[in-house]
Image (spheres, rainbow, N blue to C red):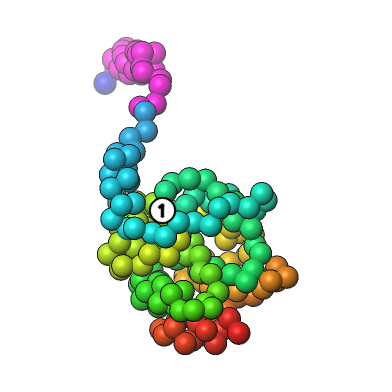
């Protein structure tokens, strides 16, 4: 290949690169497509039949009530049992019905399951499938989990005392019976 041919190839490559670089493009990103239409979320809420969330406190961490989709504030004032869970967590799926059974007992401490690392629709589907009706919230921004310094490992359960002290329950690491929950909150 002679010198003239080389320069011709270089000029052609640069010309094509220039055309590609200057070619007009639609710069606006496509609108986000929701993972599920809103009527599907409404149907999932109906299927889940969650008990209503406690009305939001004046101050607290912003979460979404899974039962009706409203934003609310969850204050760390007890007595209260907070359980962080995700749809992909198998031990969480075993523990949620136990917490639901405990919460139905007279004198039980209120239990608030907090969905993390999962989509709202997936959480509603799982709760409906498990038959868990606890008033549940979605901590999409992970603000509540950061506030209590909860680990990434799930499930993670915390007892909030009347004076606002937050204590992680590690014994047992996963509840398998309502009497274990009762013992842990005493």
Q: Quadrant of the N terminus?
A: top left
Badge 1: few (under 14), some or many (20 or more) residues near its Cα, within 10 Å? many
Q: Name the image quarter holding the C terminus.
A: bottom right
Counting from the top left corner in percent of width and height, residue 110 is at: 53, 70
Q: Is residue 58 left or right of residue 3?
A: right
Residue at 31% x, 67% y is 131
* Viewer-closest of 184 and 25: 184
Magenta stretch contains residue 109 = no
| Residue visible at 42% across and 60% down in the picture | 51
| Position in image of residue 124 (x %, y %) | 35, 56
User: Which residue is at the far right?
Assistant: 163
Q: Nearer the viewer, residue 65 or 143?
A: 65
Across and down, in percent, residue 84 comes to: 49, 66
Q: Nearer the viewer, residue 122 or 71?
A: 71
Residue at 43% across, 46% down: 69
Quarter residue 48 falls in: bottom left
Q: 39 left or right of 67?
A: left
Judge whether residue 3 is colored magenta. Answer: yes
Q: Residue furthest front?
A: 106
- In the displayed structure, 109 sits above or below 58; it is below
Relative to 180, is 134 above or below? Answer: above
Taking the spot 41% from the left edge, 72% from the top edge, the residue there is 100
Q: Magenta stretch?
A: 2-30
Instruction: Look at the numbered disc 1 and give the secondary structure of its residue.
Output: loop
Circle 1 residue: 67
């Amino acid at each position: 290949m002679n010198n003239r041919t080389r320069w011709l190839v270089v000029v052609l490559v640069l010309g094509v690169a220039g055309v590609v670089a200057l070619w007009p493009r639609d710069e606006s990103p496509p609108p986000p497509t929701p993972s599920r239409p809103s009527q599907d979320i409404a149907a999932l809420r109906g299927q889940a039949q969650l008990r209503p969330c406690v009305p939001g406190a004046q101050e607290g961490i912003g979460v979404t009530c899974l039962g009706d989709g409203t934003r609310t504030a969850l204050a760390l004032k007890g007595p209260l049992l907070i359980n962080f869970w995700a749809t992909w967590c198998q031990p969480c799926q075993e523990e949620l019905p136990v917490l639901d059974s405990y919460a139905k007992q007279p004198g039980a401490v209120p239990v608030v399951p907090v969905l993390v690392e999962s989509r709202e629709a997936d959480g509603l589907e799982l709760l409906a499938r498990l038959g868990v009706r606890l008033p549940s919230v979605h901590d999409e921004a992970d603000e509540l989990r950061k506030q209590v310094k909860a680990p990434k490992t799930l499930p993670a359960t915390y007892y909030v005392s009347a004076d606002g002290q937050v204590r992680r329950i590690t014994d047992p690491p996963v509840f398998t019976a309502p009497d274990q929950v009762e013992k842990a909150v005493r």
